[in-house]
Image (cartoon, helix red, strand yellow):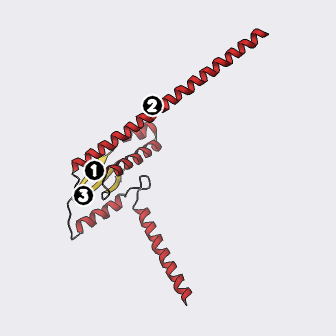
Amino acid sequence: FMSLIWIAMTVTMMIHYFTFIQDKLNTTDQLTHLANKQRLINFIDKVFNSKRREDIYGFMLDLDKFKAINDTYGHDVGDYALFKASEILMKASPSNAFIARYAGDEFIVIIPSSDHQTPGQFAKRLEEEEKQRRLKQKEKEQKEAEFREKIKKMNDMQQQRLYEKQMEISKKD
């Protein structure tokens, strides 16, 4: 009899777990790992239907020239740009913010006013995160250029040595 109880409990726990996973998959944007539009709608319904009202700040952001990125560099690079944008939003947002990918290159950030962060402060943090990303990208590109230059010099030196050895061999003949 006890084994049946354990089996029933295990099956029940598995059902709850799979339901949780399925719900998470259905409400999470697979590319950015942010909430998707459906979870955003559910969140807004919950906020507006709550008996305990709290002021919130809402931000709608879209990526400038995103279509040009996709058209010029392809959808893989566009996907990477969306992923990096989501990372910047997560870093700039307070921990209690709700962040969602609304559609395409549009994102929504909702911050409760209880966070004591003003809309201007959030915008400033977002700008700072983007500046930091650009600085890191510039440093990375500079290091890569320096590395390519070193490789080129090494190849030039090898070519010069090969030429000199060939000249020595031809002089001996």
Task: State left or right for residue 42 relative to residue 167.
Answer: left
Task: State left or right for residue 43 relative to residue 119.
Answer: right
Which is more foreground, mark 1 or mark 2? 2
Q: In the rendering, at what x and y percent does residue 98 appear? A: 31, 58
The residue where tag 2 is placed is 142
User: What is the C-alpha distance between the residues marked 1 and 2?
Assistant: 34 Å
Three-letter code, disc 2: Gln
* Residue 143 position (above or below residue 32): above
Instruction: Specify which label sits upstream in the sequence, 2 or 3.
Output: 3
Q: In the rendering, at what x and y percent does residue 72 appear? A: 43, 36
The residue where tag 3 is placed is 115
Is mark 2 in CB contact (under 8 Å) with mark 3?
A: no
Viewer-proximal residue among 168 and 19: 168
Q: Secondary structure at mark 3?
A: helix
Residue in the image at 30% along x and 59% along y: 96
Residue in the image at 35% along x and 53% along y: 101
Which is more foreground, mark 1 or mark 3? 3
Disc number for residue 60: 1
